[in-house]
Image (cartoon, rainbow, N blue to C red):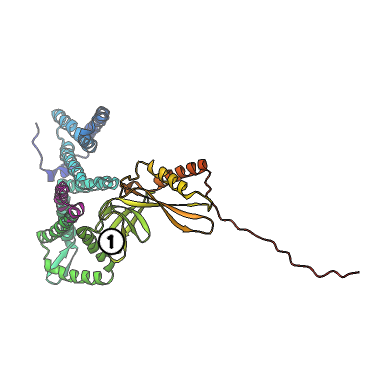
Amino acid sequence: MAPSVPFDNLVTRLIEDSRDVDLLWQVAILALCALAAWGAMRLLKSRIAGVADLWSIGREGVHSAGFPLLMLLALLVGREVAQLGLANTHLLNLAVPLLLALVGVRLAVYALRYVFEPRESLKVWERTAAWLIWGAFALHITGLLPRIQAGMEALSFQSGGSRFSLWLLFQAAAVILVALIAALTVARLVENRLMGFSQINLSLRMALSKAVRTILLILAVLVALPAVGIDLTVLSVFGGALGVGIGIGLQKVASNYISGFIILLDRSVRIGDLVTIDGKYGEVSRINTRYTLLRSADGAESIVPNEMLITQTVVNHSLSKSIVRVGIPVQVAYDTDLDQARALLLEAACEQPRVMQESTNAPRVFLKEFADNGINLELGIWIRDPNEGQGALRSDINWAIWRRFKAAGIDIPFPQRVVRMVSEPGPAQEKP
């Protein structure tokens, strides 16, 4: 076996051997390894396609890092074979650590997918982050990173007693990114732990989890900046400018964030409540730090700033009780037997399984007023599941009322107008 060559000399040796025939053989071996890995990957995908959902994490991990891992295994075998007949294998020696780094980076970045909420956009960021990290590692292996670092160090500026360079800012961004990912990971674990305590109110659990996440993110930044040599005192000017910006331009944004925590803590509006805000009726499906998501019966979602829930009147239909009253107006003609109409309305309501039948919340019929075209009645019912909506229930009851009124000969009046044509007397006819 040929002795190993240090990483920083691999590129130099590769350039020196660029005119050697051995280089062509190494390129051919890389192509064969890639072809073998591609074929093995296709076969492996067909085998694991029918695996149970329990192994979905492993199946997706194979899709993410399977090809470079298989190519790495094939390349290790190919390099051992090549060393028997070739004088040098510098290209293969360079490809092995690059493939190994690619496998590790893809697996590490793929594992972060389960820290955040799964979304399609994360897959794009996952691939981008993987290639960026692998590119930095590749530059380090090939020895090009020190040259790039020296060039970035040359681009610098002085601010007070501190010197900032492009390389320092890049390091700060990288360290802050790692610290934020670590903070989000810990916050996600704490959030999962808090959500498991069913004894605590859901709104309080969400408030605690969001507070923990905010504190951890702030601590991550405060710890990351000194780690790269940036004094926190230089942030005093930035903090003052940020305070002025919040007081002038970001006042509404800050107000929404503070209002979000107030809503979660005082529990005046909770997830699952049926509310009316600014004329919009729906179910509160999510309370974020900046806005509240309101889902109406037709599936439309309204984004309501949290400040509106503090400064405006909010009608909470299910704050203390989960039952809701539904009023269905009906108009009948003046010659209608009201006792019969009342009985038919109660029958139409009682046949619906969602309508409560208890004595205190039993359906009732109210005589509202004597209108111009008929007598206005209202069928009042109570339901326990307002989250299921009222549209279908109203439609079913109206259909039942219509059938019963038709069978009983009860008319539902419509506006009528009586017009009398009065002819004016003509001029008196002259007598002959």
Quadrant of res 279: bottom left
The front one of 124 and 144 is 124
Does any portion of residue 4 appear in the rendered image?
yes
Residue 262 among magenta residues: no
The front one of 431 and 245 is 431
The front one of 169 and 353 is 353
Q: Position of residue 20 (x, y in %)?
A: 20, 36
Residue segment shown in magenta: 183-207
Residue shown at 54% from the left, 56% from the top: 373
**On the rendered image, what quadrant is the C terminus found in?**
bottom right
Is residue 1 rendered to the left or right of residue 263?
Answer: left
Q: Position of residue 43 (x, y in %)?
A: 26, 27
Is residue 94 rendered to the left or right of residue 303?
Answer: left
Residue 202 among magenta residues: yes
Quadrant of res 209: bottom left
Residue shown at 65% from the left, 60% from the top: 419
Task: Estimate how packed mark 1 is, as few (under 14), some (14 to 19) or many (20 or more) residues with alpha carbons within 10 Å.
Answer: many
Residue to which mark 1 is pinned? 306
**On the rendered image, what quadrant is the N terminus found in?**
top left
Q: Position of residue 6 (x, y in %)?
A: 10, 42
Amino acid under disc 1: Asn
- What count of labels does the image hold? 1
187 lies above or below 236: above
Give SS at disc 1. helix
Q: Main secondary structure of the magenta part?
A: helix
The front one of 411 and 186 is 411
259 lies above or below 183: below
Instruction: Name the residue furthest right.
Output: 432
